[in-house]
Image (cartoon, rainbow, N blue to C red):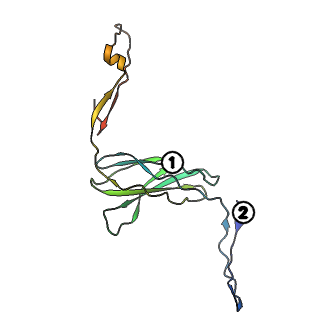
Amino acid sequence: LVEGLEYQFRLQAVNQAGNGAWSKATKEVVARDPCDAPSVPEVVDVSNTTITLKWTPPKKTGGAKLAFYYVESWDCSKKNGYWSMASRVCAPQSDCVIQNLEEGMRLKFRVRCKTVNVMSPWSEESPEQIIRQELEAPVITMDETIAREGASVRAGLDYELVIAVEGKPRPSI
């Protein structure tokens, strides 16, 4: 098949008794290179009502530009679970925040992309994630020299001091 050309297909069964009749032709289909699946979605952050996911775009897109990513979730706490749409993201962005979740939910995620021509297969599923606020005590990081010796600034001059503050939930200063 030549990429970009339209094709129709018909089938004919053959056995020891002879050839069967040809099937009706399919609708015209344009031959396209396939698009690989994105990587498994990774958890970046979790709160008691949200989860932030990121993934790597597919290595091969069939030569077409990525248009969207579709993220689905599976509620592992339900016996008769099913995949449901969690988010649609415009490419080239490859992360999302899923909101309005309930604390204690156990979810898995998968992602696929759509180019202007084709839809990719689904990524592999993420490991199960429990929706709950992770707690980490606040940590302040600053230049050791300034922390040890301090800083002198002439009156009337500007001074910028970069201090990293981390913790979960995000600390307020």
Relative to 22, is 52 on the left or the right? left
Q: Amino acid at mark 2?
A: Leu
> Residue at coordinates 53% horizontally, 60% vertically from top-left?
121
Name the secondary structure under disc 2: loop
**Front-most of 105 and 15?**
15
User: Which mark is in front, 2 or 1?
Assistant: 1
According to the picture, the residue beneath numbered tag 2 turns out to be 5
**110 or 93: nearer the eye?**
110
Q: Earlier in the sequence, mark 2 or mark 1?
A: 2
Q: As shown in the figure, which amino acid type bears the numbered disc 1?
A: Thr
In contact (CB < 8 Å): disc 2 and disc 1 = no
Residue located at (50% from left, 45% from top): 93
Residue 58 placed where, x, y %?
56, 51
* Relative image position of residue 127 (x, y in whole percent): 39, 55
The mark found on residue 109 in the picture is none
Disc 2 packing (10 Å; few <14; some 14–19; many ≥20) = few
Query: Which part of the image, by quadrant, shows the N terminus?
Result: bottom right
Secondary structure under the numbered disc 1 in the rendered image: loop
Number of numbered discs visible in the structure rendering = 2
Quadrant assignment for the C terminus: top left
Instruction: Indicate left or right for 139 with 126 as reference.
Output: left
**Label of residue 56 in the image:** 1
How far is the residue under mark 2 from the one under mark 1?
31 Å
Image x and y of residue 151, in percent: 34, 12
- Residue at 36% over, 17% down: 145
